Structures are given as structure tokens and as C-alpha cells.
Amino acid sequence: MKLTHLALVLSLLAAPLAQAQAHAVSGAAVLKLTQQYVDVAPKRYVGSPGHTAAENFIKDHFKPEIAKGNFVVDEFVARNTPAGPFTMRNLIVKFPSTNPAKRDSIIVLASHYETNFPLKDINFVGANDGACTSALLIALGQYYRDHPPQGYSVWLLFTDGEEAIANWSASDSLYGSRHLAAKWSGDGTLPHIKAFILADMIGWKQMKINRDGNSTPWLEDLLTKAGHDTGHAAYISTQGQPIEDDHLPFKQRGVPVLDVIDYEYGTKQDPEAFHHTEQDTMDKLSAQSLQVSADIFVDLVKLVSER
Ligand SMILES: [Zn+2]
């Protein structure tokens, strides 16, 4: 993820809210999955053994979908990265709708699962940046396995190569999502995608989801509505700026997109202190923030399907 502008808005305190309704996905369970993921694959930059361990961790949680043929590995070679060619793999898990009239329409829920190649020599584990949202997708998959979507079909997308290999630019970033958007354009999948909803850095204890100037306005409106529906409006800011993230290649091809992201991740003095540093660790996360994120994602799927 990259900010288009460096100016940052102030993060406000997010008050925890009492919640009466039952949770489809448990934030505590997402936190536990995040810990397991970081334990198994602390460093998971492209080309590393940890990257394979991360892929295997994800696959181990989708055995029923693999057995049904609903798990797709989209492998490709990123030929011209600053560090040479890399084989990368996007992982796609499909949960078809039970409703024949809506089954051909798709909501994609996405997160990147790798860590940064340039940070391979420091102790960077990306607890908030990549790990907790991969865990969130896994937990959402467990929910949709037991509660198949009744509206649009839901596809989980674990993207590879989101981070820059050297320095962020249009050609050095978003490798997996650029590849997949082109592939899905070619094979006719793109017009079926009603919404591409991305999760990034939404597990921090002091999470406040930002507005993203690159997201589709009606989806930003649904994010506001989801905040109200779930009792979590206090966790969603009214401010933000355009963000470059895995939603861009899909936006550029006309897909409605939403980036659910909190790009401020640090201290009052340095709002990015924990971002892409050794300080992006498990102790920064909370089950409550992951509960908020999970509740909002489940509600967004419902809201897009009902639209
Ligand atoms: Zn990052």
C-alpha cells in the first residue's frame, strides 16, 4: 500500500461499542489465526521458504474447497522485477451462492499475504500488514463454508506481490493484482464482479478506517452504512486520501472497488512508525478491532448483494 500524498490526518480514539448482535466471525478467532500464521510464516517475502509456508497455511484451511475444485492457484512469473524474475501465486477460494439467479455474480474479498522483499533482512513479520487480513479472509471462508452466500457468490482472493520489490512505482508493486485483473479481463470474469473489496491493515488496536479517494463512491457509502449497521461507526473516519493498493488494477478495468484500510499505524509523533518496520508485531493488534473488521466485511457482502 502507498499513500498518494504524505499528509496525514489525525487518528482519533476509537471507542469500543457494546454489541448485542451475534457475530458471524469471531475477532478473537481471527487474532488467534493471525498468531498462528505469523508463527508459521514470520517472513514470507516472495521466493522465500516462509512464502511457501504461508501458502501451505492458507491451503490447509481450505481442504473442503480444494476437494470441491473451488480453490484456484493462479501462478505466473513476474519477469521484470528489480531483483529479477519471481514466480508468484494468487490464491482464490470460491463460495458459490445458493441462489441460482445471483450465483453468476461475484463479490471478491481480497488481501495480500506476502511480506516485503526489501525487509527480508530485518525482523519484519507484518502482523497488521498482510497477516491479520489473511487471517480475516480465512475466517470469513470458514463462515461462508457453513453459511453459503445466499446473495452473490463470494470469492476470497489472497494476492501475492502486492508490496514493491525495491521502490514503489506503477511497475514495481501490485504484481499479483495486475496479473489477475488482466487475466480476468481476458477470460470474461471481470464483468461478473459486482464489487472488489480489499482488506489492508485493519487489525490495529487503535484502528480507524480511512476514506480512500480511489474507492468507488457507492461502495464508500456502503462502508458508512455497514459501520452504522454493525454499531461500529466510530471506527470509520470521515477523512482520507487516495490510496494505491491491490484494488487499483481492478478499478482501472471498470470494476467497482473498495479499500478498507487504516493507513495510519504508529504514534502521535510519527503516524507511520509501525508501518513497514520491525514494530509491526502481534502486540499492536486487538480482537476488538478484528471483530469490527469482520463484522463490517460480513455486512458489506450482504449490502452489496441486496443492492
Ligand atoms: Zn505494506
Image (cartoon, rainbow, N blue to C red):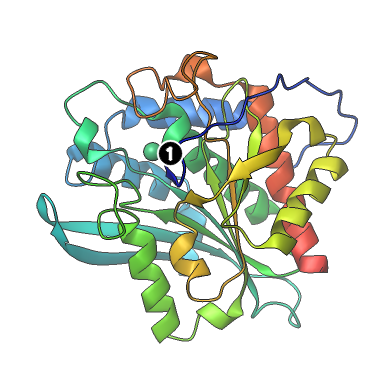
Answer with the quarter of the image where residue 28 lies.
top right
**Residue at 29% across, 47% down:** 168
Q: Determine if the C-beta at disc 1 is less than 8 A from ligand 1.
A: yes
- The quadrant of the picture occupied by the C terminus is bottom right
How many marks on residues? Answer: 1
Q: Position of residue 243 (x, y in %)?
A: 50, 49
Residue at image position (50%, 59%) is 247
| Relative image position of residue 123 (x, y in whole percent) | 26, 20
Above or below, 16 against 115 in this view is: above
Disc 1, SS:
helix
Q: Quadrant of residue 258?
A: bottom right
Give left or right: position of 60 versus 152. Answer: left
Q: Residues within 10 Å of mark 1 (few under 14, many from 20)?
A: many
Horizontal and vertical percent position of residue 78:
20, 62
Depth check: give the residue in front, 127 or 155: 127
Which residue carries the number 1 mark? 130
185 and 68: which is toward the camera: 185
Q: Is residue 279 left or right of residue 172?
A: right
| Picture residue at 63% right of the left edge, 55% below the top | 145
Residue 118 in the image: above or below residue 206: below
Look at 76% across and 83% down and name the residue there.
101
Q: Quadrant of residue 107?
A: bottom right
Residue 155 rendering spot, x and y as whole percentages:
56, 63
Quadrant in which ligand 1 is drawn? top left
Residue 148 visible in this rendered orientation of the protein: no
**Mark 1: which amino acid?**
Gly
The N terminus, quarter of image: top left
